[in-house]
Amino acid sequence: MERVSRVLRHIVQRLISLVPVVLGVSVTVFLILQLTPGDPARLLAGQVPDPQVLENIRRELGLDQPIHIQYWNFLVGAVQGDLGTSFRSGRPVIDEIRTRLPFTLELAVVGMAIALLVGVTAGVLAAYKRNTLYDLLTMIGSLIFVSMPGFWVALLLMLAFSLELRWLPASGRGGPLWTVDGWRHVLLPAVTLSLSSAAILARLTRASMVEVLNQDYIKTARAKGVPNVVVVFKHTLKNALIPVITLAGIQFGDMLANTAIIETVFAWPGISRVGVQAISSRDFPMVQGVVLFVAIVFVLVNMLVDLLYVFLDPRIKYD
Amino acid sequence: MAVSASLGTPRISMSRRVAARLRRNPGAWIGAVILLAFLTAAVFAPQIAPYDHTRQNILRRLQPPSEEHRLGTDELGRDILSRIIFGTRVSLQVGLISVSISGFFGTAFGLAAGYFRRLDNVIMRFMDILLAFPGILLAMAIVAALGPGLYNSMVAIGIWAIPVYARVTRGSVLGVKQTEYIEASRALGVSEFRIIFRHILPNIASPLIVLSTMRIATAILSAASLSFLGLGAQPPIADWGGMLSAGRMYVRDAPWVAVFPGMAITLTVLGFNLFGEALREALDPQVQKRN
Amino acid sequence: MSVRKYVLLVSLLVLVLAVALPAQAQRLVIANIGDVVKLDPAYVTDVQSSTVSNQIHERLAVYDESGEPQPALAVSWEASEGGQVWTFYLREGVTFHDGTPFNAEAVKYTFERLRDPEMASPGAGDISIVDTITVIDDFTVQFTLERPSAAFLSTSIMATRSAIVSPAAAEEYGQDLSNHPVGTGPFKFVEWQPDSHVLLQANVDYWGGAPLLSEVMFKPIPEATTQLVELETQGVDFILRVGSTDFNRIQDNPDLQIFSTPDFNARYIFFQNQKFPFEDKNIRYAVSHAIPVDDIVTAFLQNVAVRIHGVMPESSWAAHTPSKLFDYDVDKAKEYLAASGWTETNSQGYLEQDGVELSVEIYTPDGRYPMDKEMATVIQQSLGDIGIRGEIKVLEWGAYLAAVDDGEHQLCILGWSQSSGEPATMYGPQFKSHAIGGWANAMFYHSDAVDALLLQGEEETDMEARIAIYQEVQEIIAVDAPMIPMYSEYLTYAAQNHVQGYNHSPAGFDLTTVYLDK
């Protein structure tokens, strides 16, 4: 009982601590954007930037206001759930995000599931069959995967599975995940996204497993004659998973943030691609919105990871 | 027992022991040979490279590998082998410098947060801010603000990975802090400075080394990503990420333009990982105890 | 089964098939180079949006294949008072997709809306020359200009942003019109899923006759490789961009066809004429001789671009090859440098004078124009060959524009694109001295003679006289050498073989006659 209420209190605390994080992120983005050369109005004005037109655009976008007023206006809007209007599309930022965030989440969740499934399985097996050919091959394989750039893998997979074999479509999102078409479309980008994470997770799982296997209590268990399989899967796995889960949380955040290139190559209608686009077009409200949302999702995911800690490792206390 | 053994081990004999272990590990040898080869290439690039790596001949572009150009020519007719040799300098620099930035700051923050409970909240919230930033967007924004170029990319990539180190360090510190020998050291009145640097740091070094080897790879690849988004090294500098990124346009007609820099990256990363892994095993106090 | 029954069954089957086949949706899927930004024509500034917007909306007049103005929503027009008053006679019986009738009020509404400061439309710049817009009767509208303009049709009436919108829809949706565009064009807007697709449906009541296709879908696919793979695997029917590397691959594919035609764009190397060292004509001459533009175009842009020697692309009626040309000649280049006293080299082999090294910064975007960064690298080497140290600055587009507007560059790569061969719109913004800094004169070029001639060219209505004026302008510019003309990109598209009836023209992407022969 006491433990549950502690965890609840911890959740509330973390939710409250989300506020300064989000505020910090938004101030930082705002400042970086202010330092960035390039005039949003100029980019909207077309090939011939008529001075009168530039002035009109700046006024309509509120860019003629002093910086602190601009930020204050943004903040007041944000508190009321209004993240402003995209300079580029003229649509509310919140709508732009609402249409795209689910697709990026979909991609990252499928990617993470693949990475965990493949990575942890391969890592555990490698630890179990330590110093065998399987172990060696898994570790070499993971090294190769981790050292290939995402866009390169993306192109190779596309050329192989879309062009040569014609199994999977080369771009776009099909339907929702409960449709065959949805899966056919998500598979290539998700696998591309998962590869390096799977490799990193496999290596860490193995390292962590080996470390735990070397602990005294495991040795004691072995000495007592507990079978190897039981030692590996029952006694070791749970403890070895703690660093793996931390890293998986971080990896998930990386995935969310770094889908940009994969979204571009596979023309996936997600949020990262629009974020990159927004930086190029100096679409300040859109950059703010994308960064804030990705940040919030990321923080929430990490909160979950921290909570999992408590269940996995009772030695860590919250107080 | 562990405490006294560890406390009593003189420094010199420990590093000697580590060296001895490394010598016995074939992975260490292979890794060291690869890294040394690339390091040599980096240092003696002007002497080794068969051609001037920036010299173009646009009318002889995209030539397949031949006697004359062992690895073919790129989209500007430059010798790919020479560019890979010179690219070693850039890629090693990007990897090492950006990982040094994130490793130094990240470990410091992580140690402080994990060890001093009062600092924990402040530091980790600050790390959360950094970590919560979408990596590529952060790097893009930093490069857009600072201007393009190799050093700004390194800083961007370095900053991006600080919280990763901080979190892993802190997590490990939390685990190690509660082990018997740390609590025993504390009870014995050992100074905090000594506890952190003599007992905690060596005990959490292995995940950090594994992380660093991986991060060098990630940093080199991140630089390639930035190149993909048009924010890489300024031409005519040869960097593998940029070469790979430029080569993607010709992946179907002239695959060698992208394949060879890709292999160079893979091989370097492999070197770092093999060596790092061997170092981890050699440094591992658990293994040490068994001797 | 008796023979009769069998025959009956077969004929029934044939009948069903015959009925079913034409009813099969004729949906054309097009890969767009990026997502549409805005579909309200007043805000369209990019190719991917104008491609779609031009299916939905129409202008009073359009270009034909030879670049001549043709009637569209206006059936005829006339200019009076030396080109200061323009009267348009509108097409009758046209309705917008929402049922609103098209008439003179709609035209006036559209243009007044464009120049409303509250709208902050870039279109206000296109029509800034307009003084008053008067509705003469239901189907006659008159524009009075602030000064005579021969180029009024090109600069203003036929600009993409001057497409006529439904006043009812514009009033209803206001700033949100972009998400509910309503025009008179051959296709109606159905839906727009951001970054996923835009779907259009045939307008069966189109005044020019219903299009043969029933639906058109634009899918944004930014990566060129992905576009090509989609085309080869029949994921899309049409791609709107073909690079030099892919040209042969498409041509060799028996299932694909390629469309190519000269276009009205031009790409240049600009000197910063008010900055060291390019305020010195000798250095401009030297560099003009030192860069192997012919080789650059041949090597990088085979099949997809053509070399130009003047400001205007060859496809324009105003194109003129000046008598002063700069061939690739390193010796001549060195002579010009020596003429300005650049003879001594420093330890690194670069020219030096009074302790000042001859070095320039070469600004380039990355991927804005095909192979732009690579060209900058070639330029750098060419400069090195004559003893000038070149340093490349690759900037992303936003920062790049800011930098060249401010004249931070010494050398930069820039292009100009338009949908006609009109010289007034090509020369004016780039070469007029009042366009220095913040407009489009990134050369910081100032010539009183050119300023005067350009003004004259805008007001002159006689075609022969206009041609002569712009030839003179071109001759002056060639001698001043404020820039180096490089190439003009072809408009190159590719499609599946089953795409039939398409007429490829730089005047616009016309899908009304297209059908699928599957």
Image: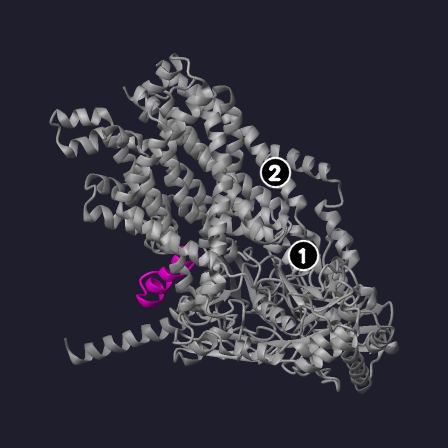
- Residue A225 picture location, percent across and down: 11, 27
Toward the viewer: C324 or B155? B155
Kind of residue at disc 1: Leu
Point out the stretch of residues depicted in magenta: A148-171
C-alpha gap between disc 1 and disc 2: 23 Å
- Residue C327 picture location, percent across and down: 67, 83
Disc on res. A28: 2
C78 vs A43, left or right, is right
Q: How dense is the environment of label 1, judged by Cα within 10 Å: few (below 14), some, or many (20 and up)?
A: many
Instruction: Say which residue appears at 53% left-offset and 48% top-offset.
Output: B154
The answer to whether mark 1 and mark 2 are in CB contact below 8 A is no
Host chain of mark 1: A
Instruction: Work out which quarter of the rendered image holds the C terminus of chain A and state it.
Output: top left
Specify which label sits upstream in the sequence, 1 or 2: 2
Toward the viewer: B279 or A285? B279
Residue C52's quadrant in the figure? bottom right
Host chain of mark 2: A
Disc on res. C202: none
Q: How dense is the environment of label 2, judged by Cα within 10 Å: few (below 14), some, or many (20 and up)?
A: some
Kind of residue at disc 2: Thr
**Residue C264 seen from this side:** no
C281 vs A166, left or right, is right
Q: Which residue is mark 1?
A: A43
Mark whose residue sits in front, 1 or 2: 2
Is residue A5 part of the magenta span, yes or no?
no
- Residue C339 picture location, percent across and down: 78, 77
Toward the viewer: C331 or C518? C331
Secondary structure beneath disc 1?
helix
Say if A54 sits above or below A93 in the image. below
